[in-house]
Image (cartoon, rainbow, N blue to C red):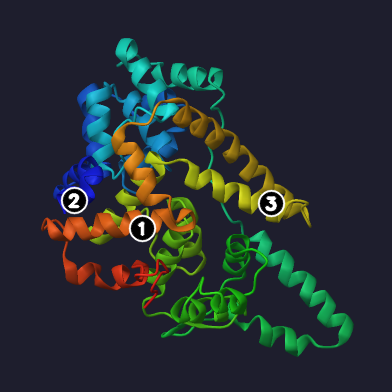
Amino acid sequence: MKDKYNILSDDLLSLEEILSGFDAYVFSEDVQAKMDAQGLSSVALGKRCLVSHTMIDRWRTGKAKPNGKERLKELGMALGMDAAKLDEFLLRNGYPRLYIKNPLDGAARLLLQNSAGAPDVVEMYRELTDRLGLFGVTTVEEEPPLATAFMSAELARAIENGTVSGWFERFRGQFAEGEKKQHTDLRLCRFLLLYLGDASIHELAVTGELNASLKNLLYPILAGKSVTVRYLREKLIAFGLYSNMTEDEIDIMLRCMKLQLLTEPVTALDMAVLGALRSAHERYPVYEQENLERVMGRLDPPQDSYDQQLLDQYRQRETVVRRMVEYYEKHPRTGEEQEFEKRYTSFSDHGVMDYVYDVLCCLIGRGSLSEGDAALLLGLIKRNENGSSTWN
């Protein structure tokens, strides 16, 4: 295993460190302790972080966590951390250390060399990233108006055609759900279509791109029908890995179906998957860039105001990710990076899935993760010998 997976050695050590303290670490308690040590009130820390004191209150009482690595970095810097302590803070919260080929991380490390502990360090950091053209780091969110607008338009058409009873039948999943079945959220249908493209599920299945289990998951969802609750979360996470999604995009799917978010891990497996997913995108930002370009191509030209809003968000993200890719590609590849790209970009559409699969297998082999806990997800993302995903 050493020869085959030596390119994962640093990632595995980081993940093992994350997992070793997963049960014991409590983010809110850590933040409160660091605030107390420096005599910082919520108001004072909020001014340092450039956020409201109510947001700080939510963080220190466990009602919320910073959304993404950038916000967590800023919190760490506002709490007076230097680069080494910030690395530890990131790891404890499931993020990779500051990465040399991430320009945002490079900017943070450069700034902290001389300004760690400064009250205005976050403001300086934002000014620096603005000068680098890395402003406006955002995540894409699906908003309820998409489903509401669509349902309203269909209702108006049903009233005009005298088929209101049919409208209620068609959208019954928006009003109720059963114990063993989950009614499909229209936002999830729309979101999946952005990633699947114009090809039908049948066409993808016939060509071997999708096998029976994935086809059987997507058919009812895209038809707006109920789906079985059992293993639904694992299958949606697996589809997100299969599609090279980021953690935020996987959370969109889970949130639509009222399932536990991946960014709120409750098991060691959740934490391992989340950490591996973040590491994959950190090491190879091209995954996200390719996805963004595909989705933007399907949104342009926009069909309505919501399409335009979503397209604007994706364009903003793509601007930042493109700069990260340029930064990554400007640096000469080390032997390890060349090996990483050879293994995890040869099947370019599913590199994240392959990477997470290998990482989980290695963690099991090293005794850091239970094989029984990971068996279902591993079965969903394992490839056959011909290179296709098994989706058992």
Q: Quadrant of the N terminus?
A: bottom left
Secondary structure beneath label 3? helix
Instruction: Indicate which disc, 2 or 3, sits on the residue closer to the N terminus.
Output: 2
Q: Looking at the picture, which amino acid does disc 2 mark?
A: Leu
For the residue pair 288 and 124, the one nearer the viewer reads as 288
For the residue pair 226 and 342, the one nearer the viewer reads as 342
Q: Looking at the picture, which amino acid does disc 1 mark?
A: Asp
Q: Is residue 207 left or right of residue 311?
A: left
Q: Looking at the picture, which amino acid does disc 3 mark?
A: Gly
Q: CA distance from mark 1 to mark 3?
A: 25 Å
For the residue pair 4 and 127, the one nearer the viewer reads as 4
For label 2, the residue is 19
Residue at 47% of width from left, 51% of height from top?
A: 248
For label 3, the residue is 297
Q: Residue 279: image x %, image y %?
A: 34, 44
Mark number, residue 354: 1
Q: Residue 58: image x %, image y %?
A: 38, 43
Instruction: Indicate which disc, 1 or 3, sits on the residue closer to the N terminus.
Output: 3
Look at discs 1 and 3 and give the one toward the viewer: 1
Secondary structure beneath label 2? helix
Q: CA distance from mark 1 to mark 2?
A: 21 Å
Q: Is residue 157 left or right of residue 127?
A: right
Near mark 3 (Cα within 10 A), the count class, few <14, some 14-19 or many ≥20, is some
Q: How many marks?
A: 3
Look at discs 1 and 2 and give the one toward the viewer: 1
Q: Quadrant of residue 358?
A: bottom left
Mark number, residue 314: none
